[in-house]
């Protein structure tokens, strides 16, 4: 059994937590271990859903590591250092090590050393091969003695940490040794993730209860359904258990927001992404759902897997992804979260776990945490707090949103909000959540609805550029939405609870759920045929933003693109159409702020100079046939350089001077 291998200084602050973009950074000497031990370790980590950074580039002798590598180290929660025989020969490795030890001291980064066929004391004291390496470094770096000394100190510090020695672990069996390392890292990451929103009030007892039903370690394949009302904490419970036990399985996968993704992208793409995630491999192409079912069974029937299928609302989702118990290997566990108990009964799951809502004490604790920043309400607000908590009915999401909404309000505003709650039925969850939305400024409401409809789980940097181009002042706006518990930032993407997103959808649809031409935003595949079928004279002035993915065009006529020209108030469009050979006449509209086009067959986007005074961001991708750049002389983009222009095509004959320095 290896010794406990870790080191970290102070606990992570919430500010620094948001900067962790990688779970693990691997530091190693390529010629020693790249194709052997490190390759096996990397595969094991990624198969367990641990996001691992492994640099595969060899740096020429004498060159220093670049900013991208330093950034990767800085943004990693855990650094694993593989000290091999020739590790100290590389100045690159030693630069990495010195920076890792700095991050350990200053950021609380966890450092795990692995002494791969080297004596820890040789590393610590620079003896043996490590001593020989420093004789050379002293000669080569004679003018930079400070750097060599920093390397020595880093080796001494890292060599003193409790680490892993393969000869002393699992009787020298490398595969078992790697499994122990992965299990240890998995548990450490779970504790970090658990601390992000600490304390998860009432969660520990609920996790233990569900783990008991999972019967981890016993044979057979079990399917467990977590059933309960929306906003009751099903996803939070599944996530907590997933990170707690994932180290005990060969492969793991957490599929979020299945209801939303199946509706937007279809079951085939859901199957493709599912297999890619669980097997940590490049995306496979699936033509039909039945083909996907067979492929899932053939790939997973001999693997012990842990899979979470989150927010399932149709039996077809389970048939496509879970199917029968025989699809998975011995010891596998499939966890399903849903609001529909009948769905679980129809699929014949082994166990239905009814989510338990918060009791009065837990509910008050959670509400007070978000309403006042402390865990008990102040005396003046105690009675009001009890009334609000009563209307939240033990729902964690409602308590969090209401608390965040009321935290900066005075007593009169509390009373007003309470009066509004009394007009709602106890079952009106969306109405309860909408109180927080109603308290936003108009520009913040627009920002929230854009994220809900289009940019949830999209790259944050890209989304912020769009918001900036549309004049939504996203830096302050996003901060407000986070403070109001309407959105979160997960890694590099925006995220929100499915009920909050559903509330956003309902706001956009308003009193016309079946008339998408009256909606301000178009994002759903089912609404596109209705829009596409509109008469050429139909005004579509209500629509201000639209996302048209190539997957939406399966059953559409390619001759009806004229409807886009009727959207006179359009401020941004994200349009993917690999079949397009030309853009509609009178497109783009004059009020457009952001233009994103992908994959058309056009040789020229438009002729002459377009008057687009509001356009501040343009992104063109995969235009292989484009030979003439648009005339952008009148674009506002030239007057405001902070907005990005990205364009990729392989050949061109003519381009205007404005584009000459912008090709990537």
Image: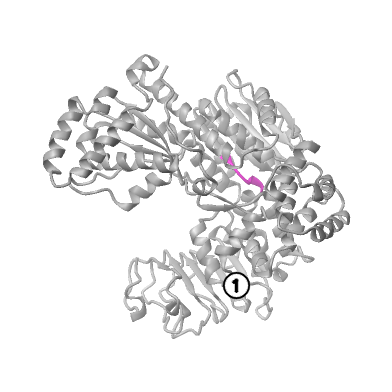
Residue name at image x 79 percent, y 66 percent: 511
Q: Is residue 249 above or below residue 450?
A: above
For the magenta stretch, what is the residue range? 254-259
Q: Nearer the viewer, residue 413 or 322?
A: 413
Can residue 589 be found in the magenta stretch?
no
Q: How many marks?
A: 1
Instruction: Specify whether 50 is left or right of 323.
Output: left
Q: Nearer the viewer, residue 55 or 385?
A: 385
Instruction: Specify whether 429 is left or right of 288.
Output: right
Q: Position of residue 234 (x, y in %)?
A: 69, 39
Q: Is residue 276 above or below residue 658?
A: above
The scheme the figure's colours follow is one colour
Q: Is residue 131 above or below residue 257?
A: above
Instruction: Specify whether 660 is left or right of 532.
Output: left
Residue 116, located in which quarter of the rendered image? top left
Q: Which residue is mark 1?
A: 560
Q: Is residue 662 above or below residue 148?
A: below
Residue name at image x 73 percent, y 58 percent: 436
Residue 525, located in which quarter of the rendered image? bottom right
Q: Position of residue 344 (x, y in %)?
A: 73, 34
Q: Position of residue 606 (x, y in %)?
A: 46, 80
Residue name at image x 70 percent, y 33 percent: 225
Element type where label 1 sits in the image = loop
Q: Position of residue 148 (x, y in %)?
A: 21, 40
């Amino acid at each position: 059994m290896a010794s406990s291998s870790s080191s970290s200084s102070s606990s992570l602050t919430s500010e620094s937590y948001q900067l962790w973009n990688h779970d693990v950074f691997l530091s190693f000497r390529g010629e020693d271990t790249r194709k052997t031990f490190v390759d096996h370790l990397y595969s094991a980590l990624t198969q367990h859903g641990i996001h691992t950074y492994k640099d595969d580039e060899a740096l020429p002798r004498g060159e220093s590591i670049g900013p991208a590598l330093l950034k990767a180290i800085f943004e990693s929660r855990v650094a694993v250092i593989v000290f091999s025989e020739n590790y100290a020969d590389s100045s690159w490795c030693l630069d990495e090590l010195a920076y890792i030890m700095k991050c350990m001291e200053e950021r609380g980064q966890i450092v795990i050393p692995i002494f791969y066929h080297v004596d820890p004391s040789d590393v610590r004291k620079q003896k043996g091969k490590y001593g020989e390496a420093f004789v050379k470094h002293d000669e080569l770096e004679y003018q930079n003695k400070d750097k060599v000394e920093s390397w020595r100190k880093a080796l001494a510090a890292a060599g003193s940490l409790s680490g892993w020695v393969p000869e002393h672990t699992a009787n020298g069996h490398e595969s078992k040794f790697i499994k122990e390392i992965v299990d240890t890292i998995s548990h450490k990451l779970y504790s970090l993730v658990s601390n992000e929103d600490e304390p998860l009030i009432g969660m520990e007892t609920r996790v233990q209860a569900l783990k008991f039903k999972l019967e981890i370690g016993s044979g057979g394949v079990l399917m467990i359904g977590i059933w309960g009302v929306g906003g009751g904490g099903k996803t939070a419970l599944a996530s907590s258990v997933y990170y707690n036990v994932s180290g005990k399985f060969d492969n793991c996968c957490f599929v979020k927001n299945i209801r939303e993704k199946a509706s937007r992208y279809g079951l085939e793409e859901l199957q493709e992404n599912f297999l890619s995630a669980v097997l940590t491999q490049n995306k496979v192409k699936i033509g039909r759902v039945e083909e996907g079912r067979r492929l899932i069974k053939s790939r997973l029937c001999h693997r012990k897997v842990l899979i979470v299928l989150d927010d399932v609302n149709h039996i077809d989702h389970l048939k496509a992804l879970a199917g029968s118990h025989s699809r998975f290997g011995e010891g596998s566990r499939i966890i399903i979260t849903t609001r529909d108990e009948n769905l679980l009964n129809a699929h014949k799951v082994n166990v239905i776990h009814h989510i338990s809502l918060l009791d009065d004490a837990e509910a008050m604790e959670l509400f007070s945490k978000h309403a006042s920043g402390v865990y008990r309400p102040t005396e003046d607000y105690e009675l009001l707090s009890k009334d609000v908590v009563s209307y939240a009915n033990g729902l964690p999401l409602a308590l969090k949103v209401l608390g965040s909404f009321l935290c900066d309000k005075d007593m009169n505003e509390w009373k007003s909000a309470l009066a509004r709650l009394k007009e709602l039925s106890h079952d009106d969850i969306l109405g309860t959540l909408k109180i927080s939305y109603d308290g936003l400024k108009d520009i913040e409401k627009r920002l929230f609805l854009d994220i809900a409809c289009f940019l949830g789980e999209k790259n944050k940097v890209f989304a912020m550029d769009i918001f900036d181009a549309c004049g939504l002042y996203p830096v302050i706006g996003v901060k407000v939405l986070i403070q109001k518990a309407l959105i979160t930032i997960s890694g590099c993407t925006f995220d929100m609870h499915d009920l909050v997103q559903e509330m956003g959808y309902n706001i956009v649809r308003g009193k016309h759920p079946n008339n998408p031409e009256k909606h301000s935003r178009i994002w759903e595949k089912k609404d596109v045929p209705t829009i596409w079928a509109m008469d050429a004279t139909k005004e579509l002035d209500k629509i201000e933003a639209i996302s048209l993915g190539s997957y939406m065009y399966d059953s559409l006529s390619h001759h009806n693109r004229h409807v886009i020209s009727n959207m006179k108030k359009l401020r941004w469009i994200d349009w993917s159409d690999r079949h397009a050979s030309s853009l509609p006449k009178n497109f783009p509209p004059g009020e457009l702020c952001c233009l994103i086009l992908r994959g058309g067959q056009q040789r020229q986007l438009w002729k002459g100079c377009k008057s687009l005074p509001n356009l501040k961001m343009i992104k063109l991708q995969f235009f292989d046939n484009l030979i003439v750049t648009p005339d952008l002389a009148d674009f506002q983009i030239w007057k405001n350089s902070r907005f990005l222009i990205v364009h990729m095509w392989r050949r061109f004959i003519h381009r205007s001077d404005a584009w000459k320095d912008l090709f990537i």
